[in-house]
Image (spheres, rainbow, N blue to C red):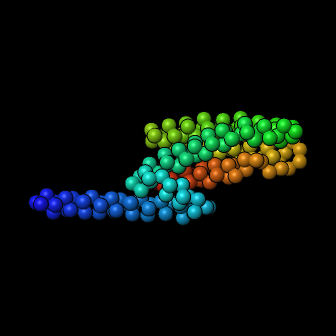
């Protein structure tokens, strides 16, 4: 019975410190996301990752880059299935093959951005993020040239990469301004 008050105090201290850490994380996330073009998307990215609540800016940058890498990998895994549906559409197939190459290049750039961010080489990370985003922009624009304008079958994926890139840059900008 003598241990019960000690355990209760220990539990309360532990809960209180966790609670304060979560609030600090939520406040930081909200201050970043309010500057993004899609506040709800930004909040969702961080709220769905349990590490976000206690992450500092460096950690949030890594979480956002990780989400971008996962998004790109998911898109790449779906492209072969989409290509098989485009058998009778040579232009659509050609465009999507170009996008597949662009997404492979983008994946490499974001992996390099993760590595650079891990080493606190934020300017290098910004360059990789820019380059990785630009090749996805090339994919997106591919559907506006060389034939009739069309909507890419991975249009929503492109938009997610654009939003994630913005979030990463918002976080890294705060690190650099600090």
Residue at 59%, 51% (x, y): give it.
Answer: 164
Q: Is residue 162 left or right of residue 144?
A: left
Q: Is residue 28 left or right of residue 12?
A: right
- Percent of width and height locating residue 94: 82, 37
- Nearest the viewer among 4 and 173 is 4
Q: Is residue 70 left or right of residue 147?
A: left
Residue at 84%, 37% (x, y): give it.
Answer: 87
- Percent of width and height locating residue 128: 59, 40
Residue lying at the far front in this picture: please name it.
1
- Nearest the viewer among 96 and 39 is 96
- Percent of width and height locating residue 85: 80, 41
Q: Give the quadrant of the N terminus.
A: bottom left
Q: Give the quadrant of the C terminus.
A: bottom left
Task: Work out whether 101 lies above or below 166.
Answer: above
Q: Is residue 90 left or right of residue 60?
A: right
- Percent of width and height locating residue 149: 85, 50
Residue at 38%, 60% (x, y): give it.
Answer: 22
Residue lying at the far left in this picture: please name it.
2
Residue at 54%, 40% (x, y): give it.
Answer: 113
Residue 127 visible within the image: no
């Amino acid at each position: 019975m003598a241990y019960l008050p000690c355990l209760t105090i220990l539990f309360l201290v532990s809960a209180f410190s966790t609670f304060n850490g979560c609030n600090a994380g939520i406040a930081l996330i909200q201050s970043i996301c309010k500057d993004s073009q899609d506040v709800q998307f930004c909040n969702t990215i961080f709220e769905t990752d349990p590490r976000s609540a206690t992450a500092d800016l460096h950690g949030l940058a890594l979480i956002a880059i990780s989400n971008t890498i996962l998004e790109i990998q998911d898109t790449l895994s779906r492209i072969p299935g989409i290509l098989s549906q485009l058998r009778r559409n040579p232009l659509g197939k050609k465009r999507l093959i170009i996008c597949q190459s662009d997404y492979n290049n983008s994946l490499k750039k974001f992996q390099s951005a993760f590595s650079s961010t891990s080493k606190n080489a934020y300017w290098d990370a910004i360059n990789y993020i820019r380059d990785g985003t630009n090749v996805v922009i090339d994919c997106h624009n591919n559907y506006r040239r060389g034939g009739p304008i069309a909507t890419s079958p991975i249009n929503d994926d492109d938009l997610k990469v654009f939003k994630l890139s913005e979030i990463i840059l918002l976080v890294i900008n705060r690190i650099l301004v600090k």
